[in-house]
Image (cartoon, rainbow, N blue to C red):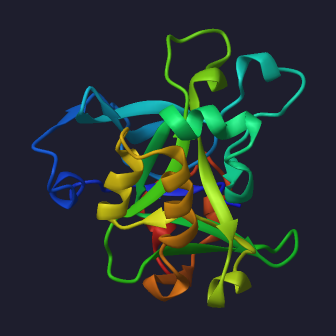
């Protein structure tokens, strides 16, 4: 599961996308070291052939699914070609740029949080699915979810699921509206970065409270 994000420094965003001369930067999201579900956060998508950075509600629930299917902050890779997600796989692919994500190990009340990030310090490009439309009463109807898969290697010691993280080049292919859904699903299965690209360290338990913010939350202890 991926349920808490560090999205604090996106300065390298455009330099990673050589095909984008500029982006529509409509995002008003401030740096956040402790992003939690239901927050509105910056996500990348392609609009009219151009890269756009917009704020979307983290969590998706189809309007017809209220009272039937709970809001989803993650979508399992194994299910994205199914009926619930297939429409978004075709027309709603997004990328959430991030600096890291958090997972917890151990048992309550002493669970230990970990900050997981690229070992080389580069931005993470997390694959997601989203619905875009006019704002309505149900915020999650126009929200996004992050795609997760089984963890591999040492990462399974932290959690048995991991978000799909792409290089910038693969993220561009994922975002490209010309990429058919079948190829996008294959990309997520075969091109997600493996555990050798990541490092992780223990962080302060204060990150467990979503009201806590600040760069100290991501520092190793």
Residue 173, image x, y percentages? 35, 54
Instruction: Out of 101 and 211, give the one closest to the viewer.
Output: 101
> Can residue 38 be seen in this snapshot?
no
Q: Position of residue 186 (x, y in %)?
A: 54, 61
Horizontal relation, residue 173 to residue 187: left or right: left
Q: What residue lies at 63% left-to-right and 48% top-to-bottom?
A: 210
| Residue at the (68%, 44%) spot, across then down | 73
**Image position of 44 (left or right of 198):** left
**In the figure, residue 99 lies in which quadrant?**
bottom left
Residue 139 can be seen, yes or no: yes
> Looking at the image, which is closer to me, 110 or 75?
75
Task: Using the image as rendered, state which of residue 139 and residue 68 is in the foreground.
Answer: 68
Whole-percent x, y for residue 195 in the image = 54, 84
Q: Count the marks: how many? A: 0
Q: Residue at x 67, y 48 (%)?
A: 80
Is 125 placed above or below 176 here?
below
Compared with 177, 174 (above or below) is: below
Quadrant of the snapshot with the N terminus? bottom right
Above or below, comparing residue 95 to residue 46 in the picture: below
Q: Residue at x 75, y 35 (%)?
A: 83
Residue 205 position, x and y percent, is 66, 68
For the C terminus, the image quarter is bottom right
Location of residue 26 (image quadrant):
top left
Q: Residue furthest left?
A: 21
């Amino acid at each position: 599961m991926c349920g808490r994000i560090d999205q604090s420094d996106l300065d390298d965003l455009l330099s990673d996308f050589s095909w984008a001369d500029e982006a529509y930067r409509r995002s008003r999201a401030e740096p956040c070291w402790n992003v939690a579900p239901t927050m509105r956060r910056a996500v990348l998508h392609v609009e009219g052939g151009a890269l756009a950075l917009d704020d979307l509600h983290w969590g998706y629930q189809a309007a017809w699914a209220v009272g039937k299917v709970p809001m989803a902050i993650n979508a399992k890779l194994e299910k994205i070609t199914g009926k619930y997600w297939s429409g978004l796989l075709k027309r709603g692919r997004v990328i959430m740029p991030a600096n890291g994500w958090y997972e917890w190990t151990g048992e309550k009340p002493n669970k230990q949080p970990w900050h997981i990030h690229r070992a080389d310090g580069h931005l993470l490009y997390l694959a997601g699915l989203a619905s875009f439309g006019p704002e309505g009463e149900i915020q999650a109807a126009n929200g996004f979810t992050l795609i997760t898969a089984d963890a591999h290697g040492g990462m399974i010691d932290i959690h048995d699921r991991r978000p799909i993280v792409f290089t910038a080049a693969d993220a561009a292919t994922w975002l490209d509206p010309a990429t058919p859904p079948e190829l996008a699903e294959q990309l997520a299965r075969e091109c997600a970065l493996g555990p050798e690209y990541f490092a992780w360290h223990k962080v302060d338990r204060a990150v467990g409270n979503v009201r806590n913010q600040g760069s100290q939350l991501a520092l190793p202890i």
